[in-house]
Image (cartoon, grey):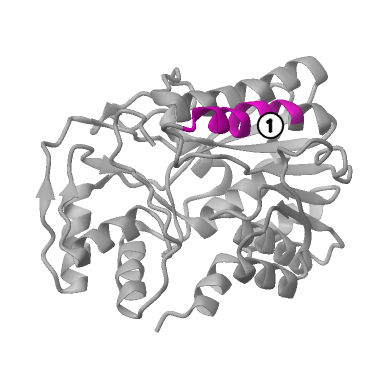
Amino acid sequence: MWTEEKLDQLLTTPSEKLAIDMKTLDGDIMILGAGGKMGPTLSILAKNAAREAGVKKRVIAVSRFSDPIVVDLLKKSGVEMISADLLTPGALEAMPDVENIIFMAGKKFGTDGNEYATWAMNTWLPSRVAERFQRSRIVVFSSGNLYPKVPVGGGGATEQTHTEPVGEYCMSCQGRERMFEYAAKTFGTRVAVFRLNYAVDLRYGVLYDMAKNILDGQPIRETTPSFNCIWQGDANEAAIRLLQYASSDVFYLNVTGPETAGVRETAQKLGKLLGKEPTFTGTPADTAYLSNAGKMFHLFGYPRVPLETLIEWQAQWILDGGRALGKPTHFEERKGSY
């Protein structure tokens, strides 16, 4: 039976390879925007990896920390916390100088009608972070949705695919990347860009969204016929290990699973496990937001948790009464409206 404790333990147990990398990574680690969907478990994973490696390393999580569950989890794990609104004047200047930065702060949902706030968080703040921490290594969280929609059977966009952001959210994410690129070219800042396609945590993600629609009797939109996803534990590991590749030439990495998952096929598998037949709406297109993560697999190996296992875990999590974060992915969105 799934419990929060079991899930968090799985998400925060480092692999042997991560522990080895942690031995050679000099300096402490600070995660900016650590209170979101991935930040808490990433912070704890980094701390646990340092312990496993037998090295003394501060892991500092920075966020507004509005969720008491997250605060308690981080405190128990030995992660240092700094409560701050990074948009507030003086907040960045008050942060300690740290060798390694993982920048996760961002705004996506609620962009429509609130575009100025999205641009402030996703583009203006990165420009200030890039200047403040110009001597640090920085891993920058970004989105695979910067790429154009590609043919479903085409293997996915690679890091060499030209970006074509659609909608203000994706445009602001492109702006985020450009600000860090500017720092790399101007200050020599070491930067690695982490283009993620859909992490799965069981409390949220593409699979959770599908399963909830099935149980609620809501039709699943097939307009976007396929997707990529990756176990959040594997994505978090990749983010931490990516620090060693940060470069003033800017290192780009697609992060997702190896499978191109069909929406209909995945929903049918979930429906069978949940004991309820899914319904569908919309006409499937022949393109989708898909990424090719071959470069990631070459560097770090294949993800430890395959898609079929994720589907089984997701169904069982819901059947066991697991909670949800209430943060839908809107993976089916094709016009950039969030």
Image coordinates of residue 288 in percent, x first then y, are 28, 33
Residue 13 appears in the rendering? no
Magenta stretch: dominant secondary structure: helix
Residue 288 appears in the rendering? yes
Marker count (numbered) = 1
| Quadrant that contains the N terminus | bottom left
Q: Which residue is mark 1?
A: 125
**Element assignment for label 1:** helix
Image coordinates of residue 153 in percent, x first then y, are 23, 33
- Left or right, 291 with respect to 120, comes to left
- Closest to the observer, 162 or 223: 223
Q: Is residue 306 above or below residue 3?
A: above
Image coordinates of residue 12 in percent, x first then y, are 61, 66
Q: Is residue 219 above or below residue 80?
A: above
- Left or right, 217 with respect to 155, comes to left
User: Which residue is drawn at the image coordinates 53% and 24% (left, top)?
Assistant: 174
User: Which residue is drawn at the image coordinates 77% and 49% (left, top)?
Assistant: 30
Image coordinates of residue 132 in percent, x first then y, are 82, 31
Q: Quadrant of residue 18?
A: bottom right
User: Which residue is drawn at the image coordinates 43% and 21% (left, top)?
Assistant: 161
- Residue projecting furthest to the bottom: 1
- Closest to the observer, 199 or 300: 199
At label 1, the amino acid type is: Leu
- Left or right, 308 with respect to 186, comes to left
User: Which residue is drawn at the image coordinates 57% and 47% (left, top)?
Assistant: 300
Q: Local crowd at mark 1 within 10 Å, few (<14), some, or many (≥20)?
A: many
Q: Quadrant of residue 193?
A: top right
Which residues fall within the magenta stretch?
Answer: 114-128
- Closest to the observer, 15 or 56: 56
